[in-house]
Amino acid sequence: MNSHLKKRDSFSSKLGFILSCVGSAVGMGNIWLFPYRVGQYGGATFLIPYTIFMIILGYSGVVGEMAFGRAMRTGPVGAFEKALEIRKIKGGSYLGMIPLLGCLLIAIGYSVVVGWIIKFIAGSITGSLFKEDSTLYFESSAKSFSSIPWHLAALILTFIIMIFGVSRGIEKLNKIVMPAFFAMFLILAVYISFNPKASYGYSYLFNLDFNSLANPKVWISALGQAFFSLSLAGSGTIIYGSYLSEEEDVVFCAKNVVVFSLLSSLLAALVIIPAAFSYGLENELQSGPPLMFITMPIIFRSLPMGQLISIIFFIAVLFAAITSLVNLFEAPIEVLETQFNLSRTKSVMIIAAIAILCGIFIEDANVVGNWMDILSVYVVPLGALLAGIMFFWVCGKDFARNQAQIGRNKPIGKWFEPLTRYVFIGLILLVYILNIVLN
């Protein structure tokens, strides 16, 4: 595989880059997994360690992957290859295939879920979502070969956006969709707040139990959730960083990604948790994926203007999901462009064909669930670990600091090396081992 020197597309503004990174980070993990974890471990008891880990990972992992991508001007395959070349070692591109394949396979599974979301939007608009039992409606959508039209709609929408490239496709999408996502969830949060029983949800969300805070499982789950929320996988953030100008401050950009990812999680919780308490469904907060596809439609049926609220909710969820899906598919598309000299359109078409041919065989909820679990436990953390080792250790501490310093007026403090080389790498190893041991 050989890199070529043709001019690469890039982000046209700092705002576009930040919103695109926020879009890649804000996804299903923020909307259903965070409220689920809050329901599992209890309000502020989970929120406090989650916030701490988000800040730590933002100032280490997110900064590192952004700076690594920008330094190498390519995705994980090319970046890993260049990193090992610094040490006069060959074969880095093969290691780079690990996060790349993880990214592609996660995207294939994720596209199935996006198809379900589009079906639920259509069901909300037509009213069919409210005419039958929510469990039966979801089960009929999540059987083998039962969601092909919706699944294809998700992929077609995604790849049409991606054909336009970075500045005219990905950046424009996120500049429109991300503000709309936050506006929609803010509207929903305000609407839910007028329910008389919503206060029970707020009490639960902001309750702090010091005894539970001492439970190691709370901290372990908060750490895993923070990795998931920030989309640290050694791929997506690297590829977006490779399109970033050297005039931009990656530390500032990473800080904004952390802030907006935290806000999205909190907004989702401010909608879902009070709504569940309002209708006596607080026990369903721990139901996992069914929380969004089964429990929320039950709640919408009971709400005044429930059909309109359902439409707004699932469109907002689609906005979060589609921006993440675009990021996941961008890494393999970039490899075909830079390593094989293919045009943007041909690269998109090849990845689209792979996604369709593989995806239609995993539409069953149990199959796609196992698919995503295996990748999330074994492949994604490994990709993040390899990227961290490559940038902070293989390239050298001075290289990492110098690259993170580009575009920044204020010198990075002495915290940088200990936080990135030891704390961050140590936390990835911890997540990786505990994911396997504790499942």
Image (cartoon, grey):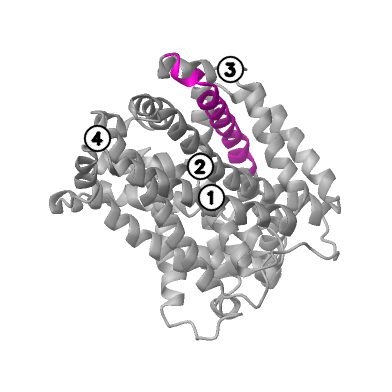
Mark nearer the N terminus (3 vs 1): 3
Q: Quickly name the residue at label 4.
A: 277
Up the image or down, 353 lies above or below 50; here it is above
Does 369 lie within the magenta span? Answer: no
Q: Nearer the viewer, mark 3 or mark 4?
A: 4
Q: Secondary structure at mark 3?
A: loop
Mark nearer the N terminus (4 vs 2): 4
Is label 1 in contact with label 2 (beta carbons under 8 Å)? yes
- Residue 224 visible, this angle: no
Q: Quadrant of residue 64?
A: bottom right
Residue 155 point in image, percent of width and height: 68, 35
334 sits to left or right of 239: right
Which residue does the image show at 55% across and 52% down from the upper left? Answer: 178
Up the image or down, 344 lies above or below 52; here it is above
**Mark 3, other Cα within 10 Å: few <14 / some 14–19 / many ≥20:** some
Q: Quickly name the residue at label 1.
A: 180
Q: Quickly name the residue at label 2.
A: 316
Q: Quickly name the residue at label 3.
A: 144
Q: Residue furthest front?
A: 305
Q: Main secondary structure of the magenta part?
A: helix
- Residue 103 visible, this angle: yes
Is label 3 in contact with label 1 (beta carbons under 8 Å)? no
Residue type at mark 2 is: Ala
Q: Secondary structure at mark 1?
A: helix
Residue type at mark 3 is: Ser
Q: Secondary structure at mark 4?
A: helix
